[in-house]
Image (cartoon, rainbow, N blue to C red):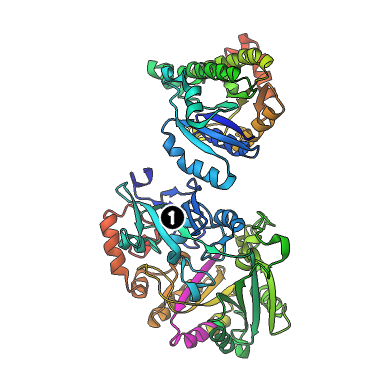
Amino acid sequence: MRASQGAPTLAQGNCRSYGDACLYERVVSTLPLHHLLEFDSDKGLLRAQAGCTLDKLIAYSLPRGFFLPVTPGTKFPTLGGCLAADVHGKNHHAEGSISAFVEDIDLVLADGHQVTCSRLEHADLFWATMGGMGLTGLIYAATLRMKKIESAFMCTRTIKTENFAELCQAFAQTQDQYTYSVSWIDCLATGKKLGRSMLMLGEHATATEAPGNTRFKAHADGGPSVPFFLPDLALNRFTMQAFNTLYYHRQFSRQRDTTIHYNPYFYPLDSVQHWNRIYGRRGFLQYQFVVPFAGGREIMADLLARIAQRGTASFLAVLKTLGAQGQGPLSFPMPGYTLALDIPLHDPGIIPFLQEINKEIVRTEGRIYLAKDAILDREDFEAMYPRLDEFKRIKREVDPHNHFRSLQSDRLGLT
Amino acid sequence: MRKRALILGAKSAIAQAIVLRLADEEYDFVLAARDSAHLAPFAADLKLQRGCSVELVEFDALDLASLEMFPQRVEEQCGAFDLGVLVFGYLGEQRGTEQNTEEMLKVLNSNFTAAAVVLGHLANYLEQRDKGGGIIGISSVAGDRGRQSNFFYGAAKGGLTLFLQGLRNRLAPKGIHVLTVKPGFVDTPMTEELEGLFLVAKPEKVADDIARAYKKKKDVLYTPFFWRWIMLIIRSIPERVFKKLKL
């Protein structure tokens, strides 16, 4: 296995993590590992090479009546990348993160050996790899327990809430009733409207709820593309505010029920290729953290107020509740509220501002999502992940010379 | 009834693109290559996604003695086949090859001797079977004229082109079609190290051209198409002038 020879390196998938977690001076692309290996339709077990994108897994399994057990908001990351970040989805509060559905993985270690890890075999290594950001080795293949579905459609309910308190209440009321939930927040609304939002709930539609002959129709490729980088001025406080206001008022009634295809439901941004270009050449920062339920509300309200006040507009601000902590020592999800923001980088003070917020997150015993991080420092990171020593012990065992490393792992003192 | 194609040199990028394209035409496959176990993931994906049957057989073109019974061995292991696709080849590096007998033989044997021997036996097999079918041979535009930059490879491929021509002549009355393919530069591991390439085609494009040409029973295919005209020009330069060019 060539990945384990020579200078330090990092397995790189489809580069869908937002920060520097997928970057290093030398990387080994897993994209040629794009083959499906086995499918057991009785048990719903799909074994695939790690370079398969979620897109490919869905295209194969959906017409056969199965869907991903957990999916992030885009279908373009690779399977290996999703495991390395232990990704969560809109169903985290009910069903957990993706590692909960991984039967086993084949991992290529720094010494060139390939080992199969599962809950029973090399369990420590298995869990360290779930959320381990690629630092334990190169994931060659994995077996995923897919979810049996009756159709490609989702029954959704969208609830408008006027402010943050109402949103939290709506989350609390609907939590046990819906498998999928997520809310979009208008980060620019201030004062009494602070935290006005749309809470979007969903369930897989049953055979009878789905529209007739398109029951198991997978998504089509392509869609419109943003052809070039928009100028920095294109997104400013006013255009953002206009967009957010329009988006919020799109729905008049407080509550609306619809049945839609999984593609716009789970992957709204995938339909516009190169959507990142709307942020201009300087791009944007993605920032996501979780804070515990206890005391979380107040802190979130305070943060939202400060973000709104600053006017560092966010095109997409997403809030959701997370469920139980996963078993991976570096796994991000823990019970609480998680907020994800896209922040254009043309505000020069934004990074110090967010670093200040990092300190507050540490104080509340919350944490930053490593798959989206680019600015965390070592001290805050170490305070955020209490099981870090456990991870480091396993890393030392399987990769004593830090063969697998990333710009992020160097920054955070993991390697 | 489904047709079955035997792919010789199935690990190459062009071979895999051809397989994926032929899967659209409802072929089953026998994939022959050295260390064929490495093809297991490719074969598994093919079976799952396309629902075709795929068998792997061990094949070493340079083991010339093993080639005589090869078609029979394939039939025993995997059943009869209708189409043989010869994809294997070895480019080598011209300057190095010129100084090394072993390399010279490897280039000549891979691209010509082994190819001719296995195709000869394949032709006998298809003829005896007497159910039509065909042969697709991947030669190269490099075989159209000898040039200082790659004439070991070019001469062997030129020989293969002539061999395929003769084979077509022999098999035509039997209803067995022979397609000679002359690709230009293709974006594959074979050309990865080469510098200054132009008009580089994707393997998928080449595979699509090949599948169409075979269906239409074309005899000689340049792919992409413009290589026919480029090679026409190159072939028509008088030798007096050509020998002084740096091509």
Q: Quadrant of the C terminus of chain A?
A: bottom left
Percent position of residue B128, x then y: 58, 17
Q: Is residue B135 left or right of residue A51?
A: right
The x and y percentages for residue A285 are 52, 67
Above or below for B186 versus B134: below
Chain letter of disc 1?
A
Q: Pointer 1: residues within 10 angstroms few (<14), some, or many (20+)?
A: many
Residue B77 is situated, as x and y percent measured from the top left of the image, at 47, 30
Q: Residue furthest top?
A: B240
| Residue A274 vertical position relative to residue A315 in the rendered view, above or below | above
Q: Quadrant of the N terminus of chain A?
A: top left
User: Which residue is identified by label 1?
Assistant: A142
Is residue A99 shown to the viewer in this render?
Answer: yes
Left or right of residue B65, residue A124 in this image: left
Q: Position of residue A245 (x, y in %)?
A: 69, 79
The residue lying at 46 percent from left, 19 percent from top is B67
Q: Is residue A108 magenta?
A: no
Q: Is residue B114 above or below residue A42?
A: above
Q: Is residue A297 magenta?
A: yes
Q: Residue at x 54, y 80 (%)?
A: A307
Count the marks: how many? 1
Q: Nearer the viewer, residue A234 or A143?
A: A143
**Residues drawn in magenta:** A284-304
Q: Amino acid at mark 1?
A: Ala
Label 1: which secondary element: strand
Q: Residue at x 44, y 56 (%)?
A: A143
Residue nearest the observer in this picture, B60 or A290:
B60
Q: Is residue A85 visible?
A: no
Quadrant of the rendered structure where residue B86 is? top right
